[in-house]
Amino acid sequence: AFAAEAGLELTSRGHVKVDDRMRTVTDPCVWAVGDAIEVRNSAIGGDETWAVALGGPANRQGRICAENIAGHPQAGTYRGTLGANGVQLFGLTAASVGVNEKFLRSKQVAYKAVYLHPKQHAEFFPGVKLMHMKLLFDPSTGKIFGAQAVGEDGVEKRIDVISGAMHAGLPARELADLELCYAPPFNGARDPVNMAGMIAGNIMDGLLDTITPLEFIESVRSGEFERSSS
């Protein structure tokens, strides 16, 4: 309400429009950061924007905003938000980065989903726990759109790694080549992130085809599953 009353241009969802230096597009003397603005959705790219209420992105926006207001000669620009986040509930950690299947379907974006259920560290080491992961990527280019994971231990670490890979523009198959910290209390010989990259590479090379739970449900409802089974 305050921004609208001040005459600032808002998005369709009511957030302040800013450029990549955090300056409002309406008034060059007004700047905005954090929950009040929409930023580039760097998981998808292009002109797609979203509002992400997270402390990490807001902090970086504040730094960039301050540098530009102060006229810093190397003042940065904001490249967008991936939305890496996590939550703990009843002994479980759930974390994600990027966009989900619902978003990709709503935008009619072609994608493939990798599901895997690895252990968080070496299976022979005490305290081993199962985690559940999903990786979403473009089957043609390998661009990573997002990932989600849930488990008792080691979940946020894997999402952090995938977030870093997305920021660097690594294709999904190159997750297999990342050298990650190894010791039996912390990891197996193949990190879950490596395993996700291996599966994605197999799909891209035509060595493996998959069907997700959502695709299976849709095939049953449409009758396609019965026809293919007969």
Image: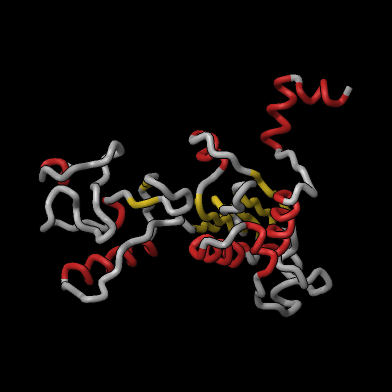
When the figure is inspected, residue 57 is found, relative to residue 146, above or below; the finding is: below
Would residue 206 appear left or right of 34 to someone viewing this image? Answer: right
Q: Residue furthest bottom?
A: 183
Q: Residue at x 11, y 43 (%)?
A: 7
Q: Find residue 98 and report its horizontal and vertical position in percent.
A: 50, 52
Q: Find residue 54 and report its horizontal and vertical position in percent.
A: 39, 58
Quick one: quadrant of the N terminus? top left
When the figure is inspected, residue 117 is found, relative to residue 73, above or below; the finding is: above
Front one among 153 and 160 = 160
Quick one: quadrant of the C terminus? top right
Protein image colouring: secondary structure
Front one among 196 and 74 = 74
Would residue 193 appear left or right of 70 to someone viewing this image? Answer: right
Q: Find residue 177 and report its horizontal and vertical position in percent.
A: 68, 69
Q: Residue at x 69, y 53 (%)?
A: 200
Q: Residue at x 24, y 59 (%)?
A: 22
Would residue 3 appear left or right of 182 to someone viewing this image? Answer: left
Total tally of numbered discs in the picture: 0
Q: Residue furthest right?
A: 230
Within the image, what quadrant is residue 175 found in?
bottom right
When the figure is inspected, residue 16 is found, relative to residue 86, above or below; the finding is: above
Q: Find residue 117 and report its horizontal and vertical position in percent.
A: 74, 55
Q: Residue at x 30, y 53 (%)?
A: 35
Within the image, what quadrant is residue 149 found in?
bottom right
Front one among 203 and 189 = 203
